[in-house]
Image: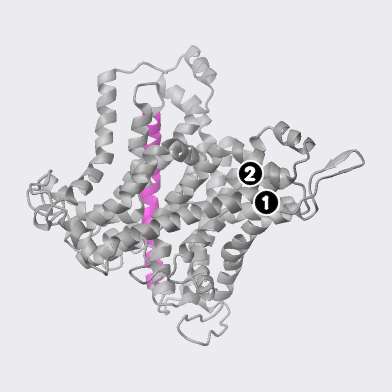
């Protein structure tokens, strides 16, 4: 790296003028190529009839976006079905992923032997990828051959019929990712000053009022992060549906991301898929803003 | 904190542990069963006639070269972790310690991209990777993931928390920025670098949606798209699929056991999914 050290007028000059930029350069090359450029390039693609396999990619303006709102278009019903699948999944899984990890964090937020071990055990599934989790649970929940039905008896169609498929997708996701939220909650709980609990105890009031007046307010920033993050992650759901239900029954559990990937990267209709991905982004942006607002209003 | 009744307490904790561990044990046990035994009703817990037949089946089929997938996964995840460490630490150092024009603007721009959902980038990145001639190569798995803003953000925070005295002492001894960075700052940052390396490795090792669409040839795949192939090819020959899942699980579970502190630390500061 070029950096001269020269004493100028009693002041130590640490760096040449180019030095900071040289430090930034390697990151900026990858960042520009794989984040900045594609973020804009995607918009450009969405304004074209962009078929990867065809030489011509004619400019069509907002037609790809309009098609998503036009009941007569080929993509309309599939797109909204997939968006509602993502919506159903998000609405069902987010509350569970907010509450259950909090309970587990409260369970672990005491001093006892083996605390680190239990935390590690509850977190362990999250270390595995969705591919492992997916093929594993497809096996465990196989209606005829799986161990779950062998234990509980009957032949519940866990992966092939609704509402069971939703129970499966939500349940597996909660089992898989709960440790992630629990660890963040736990870090938040440990940041709450002890004196607050002592003060609450002096004031009297039971466990519940302690939880309401000390724990919950103390967790506010963490709660905001977990809420927004869990919504975004749920809206990104792909692997569980892809591997466990494969969208079944029919295409009912095919999520928006699954449909976008199918249209863009399997059917190679990239213009339409890009338009869907920006529309979904806009939806998520609006939802995030609403959540931020809700948290701010509770402040007052 | 408050006193607890030990017996009830540990019963709950151990019961919960069972919920998280039992499915993983079942995967392990199934990988050593015959395909008939794996789907027997009522099921057997321990393999009655333990066999490595599932692994032999995997190795014997050149459409499912699981050892090759394992090697590819190791290469891609290690390569990306090293690349992230190199580029993110340099950028983070400039943003934490050096003065230059547009510093706030550049940092703001990097942080803003944390809010771009990853699925928006998938389609344009497919075309960019194609243009660069990297489709169906491991480069497609190593490079794009290294552009994430998390590493820069995470290391910048850490560098800002370091005391400046040692760096100032090095300046008085005539060290230049590069020497300060490599001889003073990086050695002080080992825990943060380890955290970032482990998290990058895990994220890359587990990545699924990207490799299933940018890798095609059996010998180029990593383990997650490989498992998708296994599920399609072996449908209800579950020991073979579980054997593949085991190969994909054991390395990261071991890494987690060894580096638990770093993983938990990284997650506490949020964001395994990038």
Label 2 close to label 1 by CB (< 8 Å): yes
Residue farthest toward the right in the current orientation of the protein = A9
Foreground: A124 or A5? A5
Foreground: B102 or A74? B102
Secondary structure type for disc 2: helix
Residue indicated by mark 1: B107
Q: Position of residue A197 (x, y in %)?
A: 49, 19
Secondary structure type for disc 1: helix
Does A66 sit above or below residue A39?
Answer: below
Q: Is residue B115 left or right of residue B239?
A: right
First-in-chain label (2 vs 1): 1
Q: Is residue B155 left or right of residue B262?
A: right
Which residue shows up at 44% across the image and 73% down it? A264
Does A64 sit above or below residue A124?
Answer: below
Residue indicated by mark 2: B156
Looking at the image, can residue A96 be seen?
no
Which label belongs to residue A1? none
Q: Position of residue B9 (x, y in %)?
A: 29, 23
Which residue shows up at 11% across the image and 51% down it? A154
Q: Is residue A255 left or right of residue B180?
A: left
Q: Judge whether residue B67 is colored magenta.
A: no
- Residue under disc 2 on the same chain as residue under disc 1: yes
Q: Judge whether residue A105 is colored magenta.
A: yes
Q: Quick one: label 1, few (<14), some, or many (20+) residues within 10 Å? A: some
Does B175 sit above or below residue B120?
Answer: above
The part of the image, by quadrant, that contains residue A88 is: bottom left
Q: Position of residue A50 (x, y in %)?
A: 51, 80
- Segment tinted magenta in the rendering: A78-107
Foreground: B194 or B271? B194
């Amino acid at each position: 790296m070029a950096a001269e050290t020269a004493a100028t007028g009693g002041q130590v000059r640490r760096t040449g003028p180019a030095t900071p930029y040289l430090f930034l350069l390697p990151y900026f090359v990858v960042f520009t190529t794989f984040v900045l450029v594609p973020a804009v390039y995607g918009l450009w693609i969405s304004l074209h009839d962009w078929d990867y396999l065809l030489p011509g990619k004619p400019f069509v303006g907002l037609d790809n976006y309009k098609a998503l709102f036009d009941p007569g278009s080929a993509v309309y019903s599939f797109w909204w079905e997939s968006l509602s699948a993502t919506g159903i999944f998000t609405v069902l899984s987010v509350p569970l992923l907010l509450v259950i990890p909090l309970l587990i964090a409260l369970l672990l937020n005491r001093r006892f032997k083996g605390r680190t071990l239990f935390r590690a055990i509850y977190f362990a599934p999250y270390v595995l990828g969705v591919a492992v989790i997916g093929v594993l649970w497809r096996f465990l929940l196989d209606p005829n051959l799986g161990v779950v039905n062998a234990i509980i008896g009957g032949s519940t169609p866990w992966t092939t019929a609704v509402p069971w498929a939703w129970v499966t997708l939500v349940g597996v996701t909660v089992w898989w990712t709960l440790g992630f939220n629990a660890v963040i909650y736990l870090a938040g709980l440990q940041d709450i000053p002890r004196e607050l609990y002592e003060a609450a105890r002096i004031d009297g009031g039971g466990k519940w009022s302690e939880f309401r007046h000390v724990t919950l307010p103390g967790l506010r920033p963490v709660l905001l992060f977990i809420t927004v993050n869990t919504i975004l992650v749920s809206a990104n759901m792909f692997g569980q549906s892809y591997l466990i239900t494969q969208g079944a029954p029919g295409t009912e559990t095919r999520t928006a991301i699954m449909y976008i990937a199918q249209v863009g990267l399997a059917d190679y209709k990239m213009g339409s898929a890009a338009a869907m991905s920006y529309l979904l982004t806009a939806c998520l942006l609006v939802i995030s803003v609403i959540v931020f607002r809700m948290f701010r209003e509770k402040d007052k | 904190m408050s006193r607890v009744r030990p017996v009830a307490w540990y019963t709950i904790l151990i019961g919960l542990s069972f919920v998280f561990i039992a499915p993983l044990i079942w995967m392990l046990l199934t990988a050593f069963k015959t395909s008939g035994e794996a789907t027997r009703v009522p099921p057997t817990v321990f393999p009655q006639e333990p066999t490595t037949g599932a692994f032999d089946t995997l190795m014997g089929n050149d459409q499912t070269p699981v050892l090759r997938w394992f090697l590819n996964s190791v290469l891609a995840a290690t390569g990306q972790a090293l690349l992230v460490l190199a580029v993110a630490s340099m950028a983070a150092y400039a943003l934490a310690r050096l003065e230059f024009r547009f510093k706030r603007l550049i940092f703001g721009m990097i942080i803003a991209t944390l809010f771009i959902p990853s699925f928006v980038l998938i389609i344009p990145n497919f075309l960019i990777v194609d243009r660069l001639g990297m489709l169906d190569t491991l480069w497609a798995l190593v490079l794009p993931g290294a552009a994430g803003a998390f590493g820069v953000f995470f290391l910048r925070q850490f560098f800002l928390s370091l005391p400046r005295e040692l760096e100032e002492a090095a300046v008085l001894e005539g060290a230049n920025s590069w020497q300060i960075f490599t001889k003073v700052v990086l050695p002080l940052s080992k825990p943060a670098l380890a955290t970032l390396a482990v998290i990058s490795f895990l994220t890359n090792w587990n990545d699924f949606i990207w490799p299933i669409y940018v890798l095609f040839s059996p010998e180029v795949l990593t383990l997650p798209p490989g498992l998708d192939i296994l599920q399609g090819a072996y449908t209800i020959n579950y020991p073979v699929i579980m054997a593949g899942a085991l190969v994909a699980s054991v390395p990261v579970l071991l890494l987690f056991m060894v580096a638990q502190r770093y993983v938990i630390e990284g997650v506490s500061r949020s964001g395994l999914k990038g």
